[in-house]
Amino acid sequence: MQIDPSPLARPFPAMPAIAGVTLRVARAHYKTWDRCDLTFAELAEGTSVAGVFTRSACASTEVEMGRDDVKNGRARALVVNAGNANAFTGYRGREAVELIRAQVSAALGCGAGEVFVSSTGVIGVPLPKDKAQAGVAAALAAEPCSWEDAAHAIGTTDTFAKGAGASAMIGGTRVELAGIIKGSGMIAPDMATMLGYIFTDADIAPAFLQEALERANAATFSCITVDGDTSTSDTVMVFATGKAANARIDSWDSPGADAFAAALADVCRNLAQLVVRDGEGAAKFITIRVSGAVSDDSARRVGLAIANSPLVKTAIAGEDANWGRVVMAVGKAGEPADRDRLSIAFGGVWAARDGLPVEGYDEAPVAAHLKGEEIDIAVDLGLGDGRATVWTCDLTHGYIAINADYRS
């Protein structure tokens, strides 16, 4: 099925090469499409790795193995298969992953546990072993490719390639970060989201890298939703090659630790927002800012309740300034809320204050705001200092069309 580009798409950015990372793509022919669908990243010896993964009870073999192996903190390669999630496939799915890892580890002379595999696409169909092995062989022999090529190859229903870069100073050394991500539907993460990979030439201890990723993830990937559905394959990983030769960061007390963590969070935030901008059928990018909650976690849960509400999302799609639907979503969130303290605004215009419609409220500027592509909703619970920002998109007929034909 041909999918038109999202109206919220962003051009692929210029991104730096990362020393110690070589990208290649190939055609494994997992689906009947005329494009590369296997991505291979070769990583320098000594590369540190960190990862966050879905908590789905039906997680794929790739997630289960990745979750175990990331604890060792070392990586030499990444293989991403697009078009087949290889989830809910039992021993046959596991055998396919083991074959891929053995094939790559033999080629690179590393342990199988240093080869990470991700797969995305249709659930319930075992990854074809012959296609996977042929695809890996083709990738190993291919010429290096660009970040944009790699970003295209990991996509499924994505309508544009997604990437983001940043840099940081560690002492007197400049380090670079570059990340790619795929995701368009089945987006409501629990610990992670979609398939996202960030690479840096910084020298970072695995334990600190894991902590920095988890902190960044909590404020970015775990604060987006397209449709309220968490994937079986959600994965976000960071690989640090150490080739920048900076003074090693092994704790928050290390010089440059805060700068690196801020750069990582910036890349994660940009990638997360790009996924929402490519939400299946999306026409509007929605930012929901919740303040006055009893805690930051409570604010995030309230924000996600609003963002996941079909009634809120369809009202935005229809450019209807129905703030009563936001009241409904706050009330059902299961978090502390007081009707008589609640305030709601669209585009900076307060429609309700302290549990009552604003006297003399003029809906015209709100209606004008809702006709744009960038929508802002503010909610003040009036209970405490907790705050969070959540990003989502509207819900249109396009979402139904894309998912009704997903397997064709």
Image (spheres, rainbow, N blue to C red):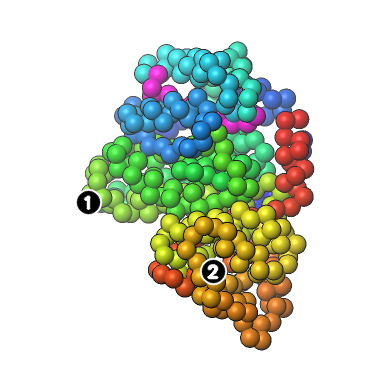
- Quadrant (top left, top right, bottom left, bottom right) of the C terminus: top right
Q: Which residues are magenta?
A: 112-122
- 88 relative to 146, above or below: above
- 361 relative to 233, above or below: below
Q: CA distance from mark 1 to mark 2?
A: 36 Å
The image quadrant that residue 163 belongs to is top right
How far across and down, in percent of the image, does residue 64 sit? 45, 27
Q: Amino acid at mark 1?
A: Asp
Closer to the camera, 179 or 194? 194
Farthest left residue in view:
253
How far across and down, in percent of the image, does residue 263 sit? 39, 52
- Let me know if residue 222 appears in the view: yes
Please name the residue that numbered disc 2 is placed on: 379
Closer to the camera, 105 or 144? 105
Rate crowding at label 1 as few (under 14), some (14 to 19) or many (20 or more) other CA atoms within 10 Å: few
- 268 relative to 316, above or below: above
Q: Secondary structure at mark 1?
A: loop
How far across and down, in percent of the image, does residue 341 sit? 51, 75
Q: Amino acid at mark 2?
A: Val
- Let me know if residue 7 appears in the view: no
Dominant secondary-structure state across the stretch colored magenta: strand
Residue found 43% across the figure and 56% down from its top = 297
Residue found 56% across the figure and 46% down from its top = 188
Mark number for residue 253? 1
How far across and down, in percent of the image, does residue 223 sit? 50, 53
Residue found 34% across the figure and 31% down from its top = 71
Looking at the image, residue 356 sits to the left or right of residue 321; the answer is: left
The image quadrant that residue 288 belongs to is bottom right
Closer to the camera, 173 or 41? 41
Looking at the image, residue 290 sits to the left or right of residue 167; the answer is: right
